[in-house]
Image (cartoon, rainbow, N blue to C red):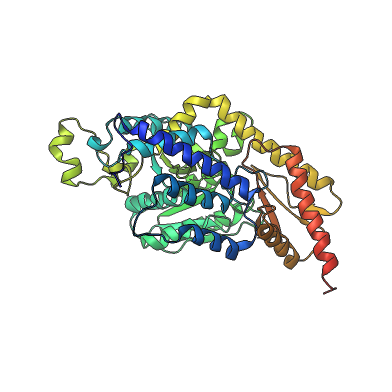
Amino acid sequence: MPTPPLAGSTTGPTALRPLIDTVLTALQEGARRRDGPLPAGGPDTVTTHMRTALDPLIPEHGTGPHHALATLIGALTEGAADPANPLCAAHLHTPPLALATAADLAASALNPSMDSWDQAPAASTLEADTTAALAAEIYPHHPHPDALITTGGTEANQLALLLARERHGPTLQTITGTNAHHSITRATWLLGLPAPLTVPAPDGTIDLTALHNTLTHHGHHPLLVTATAGTTDTGQIDPLTAIADLCHTHGAELHIDAAYGGPLLLSPTHRHKVTGLDRAHSVTLDLHKLGWQPASAGILAVPDHHHLDPLHHHAPYLNADDDTQAGLPDLLGRSLRTTRRPDALKIAVTLQALGRTGLADLIDRTCTAAHHLADLITKHPTLDLYDRPTITTVLFRPTNTDDHTVATIRRTLLTRGHAVLGRTHTHGHLWLKATLLNPHTTPDDLNQLLDLVTHLTTELTESTPNR
């Protein structure tokens, strides 16, 4: 077998072109065989099909690039959940834009490593300017805001708590709501901080009276309040301005996990929902959620670039002092990771290609679809709506059914490959969760989703004896 060609240089595109054609054909054929939002048959069936394609995983003699690509990518696609299918609506699992995915191909082919300038000359400028522009969206009235690219909301939240710990020491006490993302508690564990003090969120958002009492009682510690703009359970947004006021009164810092809701800033229709983001000491965004990027595309923004100074460190082979003094940019303080991809490229391509109006249109379309789904549920005689959607998350359940039936409905839809819905337990009940992130979703798609749920409810009710 000849030595395989490489992806870069002037000859790389010639080598890539036929391989990409094989990949695209495999994606298309795999999706055709799946023919739905999820492969039918459940874990056992999917595992068997995938292992058949993988066998042998490391053959004695290779099968060749086109056969390997067609076999494995075809099998992976056939066994994939397809977030581009309107009936795949369980999680904050976005269908990535084709243009962002194309940009990601270039990032992989060029393979800049974002840990030293000599590995990423142009990419270092691209990332610096992209992150500065995103930080300015969040902190428009600050002279020198900055942001880092992260693998997602979990890493961004961890970095935010790390920076706060470096400002205030290991006795830093976090205060968070019961509605907060699990990564906050995990970050305190990883960083050796005290476990968070948890404030109730009985209606899905932090209870302000309880927060005030907690801040008052624990004022002898340095405090960091973590609020959420777009919870994973219901999509609700904490009262950010009121929380910022309480933090100011009590001398506490504020971090806002806006992984889901942060991009609402780009929509004139919906940006009022995240008023107060600019008052936080740090903000998390996830553009592989309401930004339609391939994972990963996380952001941690801060109001002043000096807030990131604790991340700076030296490794002489990457940022020698004399190189830095001679003008080579020092990239090591831009992440806790060393080798990392130029994820800013796909973000920059998307921002430039669509502009503010294009991104606002995508956000508005998905929010409108969520409200339309809520309207359909409200009008349906056998379905109950939890609440009007704040962003694009809609909770509902069949009327007069128990939690066991709701869970069975969800798993049956998954096993049959008909639809992908999430689940959330709130207000004493288990609810089906639809998180709408597909801007191509139509009213017919939403009606089909509800029909699947109601027909299956009838099927299960008629086949189950009275409990």
Q: Residue furthest left?
A: 322
Residue 3 position in % (x across, y down): 27, 44
Whether residue 237 appears in this view of the structure is no
Whether residue 156 appears in this view of the structure is yes
- Does residue 353 lie above or below 461 as drawn? above
Residue 378 position in % (x across, y down): 81, 47
Residue at the image point whose x is 12% and y is 36% from the top: 322
Residue at the image point whose x is 70% and y is 56% from the top: 432
Could you say which is closer to the camera, residue 426 or residue 59?
Answer: 59
Residue 72 position in % (x across, y down): 47, 51
Count the marks: how many? 0
Could you say which is closer to the camera, residue 253 or residue 351?
Answer: 351
Q: Is residue 109 left or right of residue 32?
A: left
- Does residue 279 lie above or below 89 as drawn? above
Q: Is residue 52 left or right of residue 156?
A: right
Residue 118, quarter of the rendered image: top left
Residue at the image point whose x is 15% and y is 39% from the top: 321
Q: Is residue 363 left or right of residue 257?
A: right
Residue at the image point whose x is 76% and y is 46% from the top: 448
Question: Which quarter of the rendered picture does the C terminus lie within?
Answer: bottom right
Residue 455 position in % (x across, y down): 81, 55
- Does residue 104 lie above or below 399 as drawn? above
Could you say which is closer to the camera, residue 124 or residue 438?
Answer: 438
